[in-house]
Amino acid sequence: MNSTAACKEYDLIVIGAGSGNSIIVPEMDDWRIAMVEHGRFGGTCMNRGCIPSKMLIYPADLAEHAKHGDRLGLRTQFNGADWPQIVERVFGRIDAIAEAGRQYRLGLSNVDVYESTAHFVGDRELEVGGQRIRGDQVVIAAGAHSFVPDLPGIHDVAFHTSDTIMRIEQLPERLIILGGGFIATELGHVFQALGSKVTIINRSLQLLRTEDEDISHRFTQVAAHRFDLVLGSTVKNVYSTANGVGVDVESDSGQGKISRKIEGDVLLVAAGRVPNSAQLHVAAGGVEIDADGAVVVDEFGRTSAPRVWALGDINGRHQLKHMANGEARVVTHNLLHPDDLRRFDQRPAPHAVFSNPQIGSIGFTEREARERGGPYVTACHSYGDTAYGWAMEDTTGFCKLIGDPRTRQVTGAHIVGYQASMLVQLLVQGMHLGTTADAMAVGQVWIHPALPEVVENTLLKLVAAFDTAAQPVATD
């Protein structure tokens, strides 16, 4: 059907089969719905993000532990990885799930699946594969894509992004990574642990610089023992070599510029992600975007265009699957109950970085607390100062809390170390339920000698800091 043909009408159009796929619920069985998805069902998280990366990270963690059994008196060692078998284990499972989701949607009598790219051509009207469709309501859940900076030579060489690197056929001997955020550090951990020599090139002097300063500093210290870190560097040129790729960088040593040539088998560009608004031509649908290309939404998920909603990575609020799922639930309710709108969750969003060591975080960093003004206190406690930390011979992990002495609330929680992603959940629960640090610390029984004692001890230190901050200052 060509673009001049009559426009097909729907009650609802959903663009994106990631978190957007959960929008379609049984209460909509009498709606005519169009699902638009040009890739695999399940979106980024299922196919090239959260899930496959964590399925790779788990064996990487085991490999890394095997390398360091000697500190515990164990004669363990890592004897190599069967990369093709690992990839098959991951994607043999994931691809089947994605296809099952596709087949399920194709089998619904009230849902038409459009397996093509789409873009807006008017008010709630899209062109999809040469056909025009229009929805009474439209949900934009089209996600984001990897950002590739315009570096000299970058488009003349073969490179990977997180979309493709996890499916490569062989484990590279030498991997070069451009970027220092969570994608770079998670995938760097995978490949280094499984046998690659990994070089990380980053503009900043720290890895994970959006984390709390102390967390970022500690992580960078630990990472320096595993990776070849080329920090505070500018990429001057990217070029092909006989065996792969090379990168010319220039670093400022504080005593002048230092140039270096770095060569590897594979290049991974991990420089962040960009909302997919441009591909959708959202402006043609009256949908406003911000300076970063994110679709602007209000607290209910509504865009600037009437009856058009946006959720997940494309709206720029969070690039976190758990937050996108929550937004999908809100938008689903609002579609069904236009007179009883619910708001997106405005509480601090927790997140984790699944490198090694892990990071778990929620709320303000100390930098943000300082910039906000007003009083705040901090408290830190090391893994190695708890019994379980002794058992692990841990010398680098710690928990850091930031609190408001006026309300005695925890306003920021940051953990670096073993299972930080689980430990921080204790603090997420307390913060989201409005529990004071005092109640979190002494209002429950903490199992001894379990690792959560590091959180307990940090909370007790924070309570003590509150008490000190509340004491009047002595005057002569």
Image: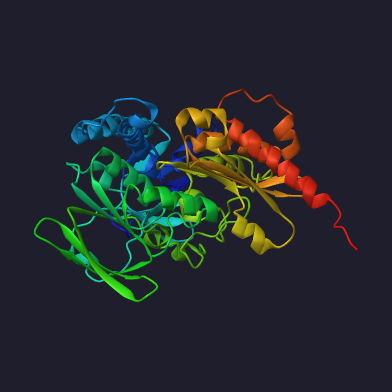
Compared with 119, 462 (above or below) is: above
**Residue 225 x %, y %:** 35, 48
Question: Which colour style is shown?
Answer: rainbow
**Residue 476 x %, y %:** 91, 63
Left or right? Give the position of 207 relative to 409.
left
Left or right? Give the position of 188 relative to 237.
right
Residue found at the very far left of the displayed protein? 242
Residue found at the very far front of the displayed protein? 476
Residue appearing at x 46%, y 33% in the figure: 393
Q: Let me know if residue 212 appears in the view.
A: no
**Residue 328 x %, y %:** 53, 42
Viewer-closest of 423 and 388: 388
**Quadrant of the image occupied by residue 450:** top right
**Quadrant of the image occupied by residue 53:** top left
Q: Let me know if residue 433 appears in the view.
A: yes
Left or right? Give the position of 149 relative to 337.
left
Viewer-closest of 17 and 2: 17
Compared with 137, 283 (above or below) is: below
Viewer-closest of 394 and 233: 394
Residue found at the very far right of the displayed protein? 476
Compared with 54, 476 (above or below) is: below
**Residue 350 x %, y %:** 56, 44
Viewer-closest of 291 and 167: 167
